[in-house]
Amino acid sequence: ACRGTMGLAHVACLALRAEMEMKEWEDWKTGEEFAKWQKCFDCGQEFHSAVQFALGWAAWKTYLARPETDQHRTLAVGVLGIALISSRRPEEALPAIEVSLALTRRYSGDENAIIITLENRASCLDDLGRTDEATALKRQIYSRYKALGGVSQRHTIMSGCSLAICLLRQSSWDEAKTFIRELLPVARRSLGADHDL
């Protein structure tokens, strides 16, 4: 676990602690449920690099034997997909993200969870150089966030920025400029002019 500035962690200890936290959640509905597979118990910082990668695999191995309908199995494959994306392994990440998306759609139906998984898929497609597919998906994500919470919601604005970046990468200058001109005033009103967006 986190020990000040030492930066040391035993992955097996982190995995065991996350598993115990999940057991507590399942038995008593206390604790942080699945979050401990993704962030430090002591400082609350999200895991990254090798620790994130190792815990992604550990989460998947822990919940793989559960039925397909089990929410924790879906979350585990999603955590693995995110860890693979962060480790710059998009070819391996895409199948995990696809499975997570299919399971979330089939058994959860939670629109927020679906959109988040779509964002992970778009990121993966972008990393694979499949820019047209990523841009089309980011348009869909922006529309879904807009329908879900309105144009001034933080998630809508952030997904709009992500879409604008894709448009700029594709040299769709006119469309990007028009889109950004619509998005910026909303972002300033909602987030404040001094926001680091």
Image (tube, rainbow, N blue to C red):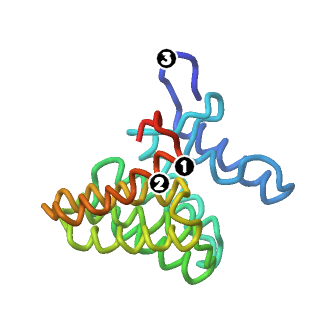
Say which label, 2 or 3, has the lower sequence index.
3
Residue 16 lies left or right of residue 57; in this view the side is right
Residue 83 lies left or right of residue 19; in this view the side is left
Say which label, 1 or 3, has the lower sequence index.
3
Is 127 drawn above or below residue 32 in the view shown?
Answer: below
Q: Residue at x 53, y 53 (%)?
A: 154
Mark 1 element type: helix
User: Percent from the top left, x then y, of residue 79?
Assistant: 50, 56
| Pointers 2 and 1 in contact (C-beta within 8 Å) | yes
- Looking at the picture, tell me which residue is in the foreground, 18 or 82: 82
Q: Residue at x 54, y 77 (%)?
A: 103
Mark 2 element type: helix
Q: CA distance from mark 2 to mark 1?
A: 6 Å
Q: In the orientation shown, which residue stands out farthest toward the bottom?
A: 106
Label 1 Cα crowd, 10 Å radius (few <14 / some 14-19 / many 20+): some
Label 2 Cα crowd, 10 Å radius (few <14 / some 14-19 / many 20+): some
- Looking at the picture, tell me which residue is in the foreground, 18 or 132: 132
Check disc 2 and give the amino acid type: Val
Check disc 1 and give the amino acid type: Ser
Check disc 3 and give the amino acid type: Met
User: Percent from the top left, x then y, of residue 179?
Assistant: 31, 62
Is 14 drawn above or below residue 129 in the view shown?
Answer: above
Residue 172, by quadrant, is bottom left
Residue 13, by quadrant, is top right
Q: Which residue is mark 2?
A: 186
Q: Which residue is mark 1?
A: 190
Q: Nearer the viewer, mark 1 or mark 3?
A: 1
Mark 3 element type: loop
Q: Which residue is mark 3?
A: 6
Residue 145 lies left or right of residue 161; in this view the side is right
| Pointers 2 and 3 in contact (C-beta within 8 Å) | no
